[in-house]
Amino acid sequence: MWHAAPVLGITDLPTYLVGLALIILLPGPNSLYVLSVAARRGVRQGYRAAGGVFCGDAVLMILSAGGVASLLTASPAAFTVVKFLGAGYLTWLAIGMLRGALTLWRRRREPHRADPNGAGGGEGAPAAGGRTPVERPFRRALTASLLNPKAILFFVSFFVQFVDPAYPHPALSFLALGVLVQIFSLTYLSVLIFTGSRLASAFRRRRRLRAGASAAAGGLFLGFAVKLSLATASG
């Protein structure tokens, strides 16, 4: 079978692109959070959350290329610390979503009032004392991305399969592969953001629907936390 010559040290680029698309389309905490933010707070806040994902992924790819993945693989203690920090943070996000869902459910028969934060949603309900908690989508998405040791291991294990070992500039190969990741991620998250913004109009005046969606998202985040806490460095 004929194979095209490697470009920038990348071997079998079509296979890489297909695999990348399939991996990005798999639901995960980052994409779910971006969709949730867009549905509750609109396109602008959705892109802030997406920005956190982009920056987090960029840092993880740099760490992978720099050998941090090897450190996590060689040190079970380091891997365990990072994974439980990540699981704890996902749990904290899930609890916030579930609490917001409960608040919405209790207020489901109250007259609708405009949400000063945008589309309204679980974590935007007024807290004790009348103050509205401030959600920082960029920071939350960035933190969730960085506290995921499996992502670091994924980047290095997936990338190395498509880097020509004879290529004299492997850093350039990793950079090209990383840029493709970000392009695919931007496209997919943009679809989620605009889908979420369309859902916002339905959620805005239907507290039961918003409560159910927030509770479902919180449950999924708890599932992600459990999955991460059970993860091992080898698989």
Image: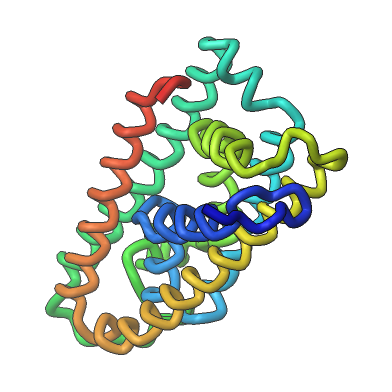
Most extreme residue toward the front is 1
Choose between 118 and 85: the one closer to the eye.
85
* Image coordinates for residue 152, horizontal then vertical, percent: 58, 35
User: Where residue 229 sits in the image (x, y, percent)?
Assistant: 36, 26
Quadrant of the drawing holding the C terminus: top left
- The way the protein has been coloured in the rendering is rainbow
Residue 52 visible at all: no
Query: Relative to 190, does residue 225 appear above or below in the rendering?
Result: above
Report whether 172 appears left or right of 221: right
Q: Quadrant of residue 182?
A: bottom right
- The x, y position of residue 93, in whole percent, is 40, 48
| Residue 223 visible, this angle | yes
**Residue extending furthest toward the right:** 168
Q: For this view, does 97 lie left or right of residue 41?
A: left
Q: Is residue 125 above or below residue 142?
A: below
Query: Could you tell whether 203 is left or right of 7 in the image?
Result: left
Task: Pick the residue in front: 10 or 67.
Answer: 10
- Residue 34, given in percent of the width and then of the height, sits at 45, 65
Name the residue rendered at 19%, 82% in the picture: 206
Identity of the residue drawn at 73% across and 41% down: 62
What residue is at 23 percent from the left and 72 percent from the top? 210
- The image shows a total of numbered marks equal to 0
- Residue at point 81% right, 42% down? 171
Q: Quadrant of residue 50?
A: bottom right
Identify which residue, 114 or 178, lies in the foreground.
Answer: 178
